[in-house]
Image: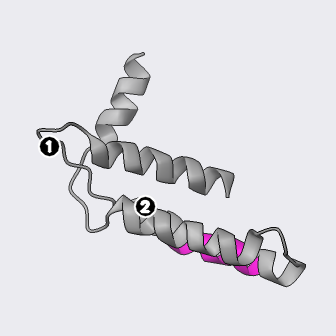
Amino acid sequence: MAAANERLASLVKRGDEFAQPLQRDLRDLMWERCGVVRHEDGLKQALLGIEAPAERARQVDVSPTDEGYEDLAHLLDLQASLFVA
């Protein structure tokens, strides 16, 4: 439990990126390159295209607000999506 709390606490920080645009970029990439109709070249391009959002995800701004930790929820979703992609 302590390790999980430490991991979550380490994600709460100021950054230059926001999770939602990165989620959108990743979603669009997966739709264009990895959809129902796909081919080897497109899948290879998708693998290369995942690197940029993955790198930018390290700089996501996560700041608590009066409403809670919505930024953190978006970042966790983004990280899970990058893992699956």
Q: Residue at x 62, y 74 (%)?
A: 29
- Evaluate whether residue 15 shows in this view: yes
Sequence-first tag of 2 and 1: 2
Q: Residue furthest top?
A: 1
Q: Residue at x 42, y 23 (%)?
A: 3
**Residue at mark 2 to residue at mark 1: CA–CA distance:** 20 Å
Q: Which residue is mark 1?
A: 65
Confirm or deny contact between disc 2 and disc 1 (CB under 8 A): no
Q: Eyeballing the image, is 12 above or below 7? A: below
Nearer to the camera, 71 or 56: 71
Give the main secondary structure, helix, strand or loop, of the magenta stretch: helix
> Magenta segment: does it hold 34?
no
Q: Amino acid at mark 1?
A: Thr
Q: Amino acid at mark 2?
A: Ala
Q: Where is residue 6 drawn, in percent x and y?
A: 34, 29
> Crowding near pointer 2: few (<14 within 10 Å), some, many (20+)?
many
Location of the N terminus by quadrant is top left
| Left or right of residue 35, residue 59 in this image | left
Q: Eyeballing the image, is 13 above or below 23? A: above
Q: Which residue is mark 2?
A: 57
Mark 2: which secondary structure?
A: helix
> Crowding near pointer 1: few (<14 within 10 Å), some, many (20+)?
few
Region of the chain picked out in magenta, as a range: 44-52
Q: Eyeballing the image, is 12 above or below 43? A: above
Location of the C terminus by quadrant is bottom right
> Magenta segment: does it hold 48?
yes
Q: Residue at x 20, y 56 (%)?
A: 14
Residue 80, disc: none
| Left or right of residue 34, residue 2 in this image | left
Q: Residue at x 42, y 25 (%)?
A: 4
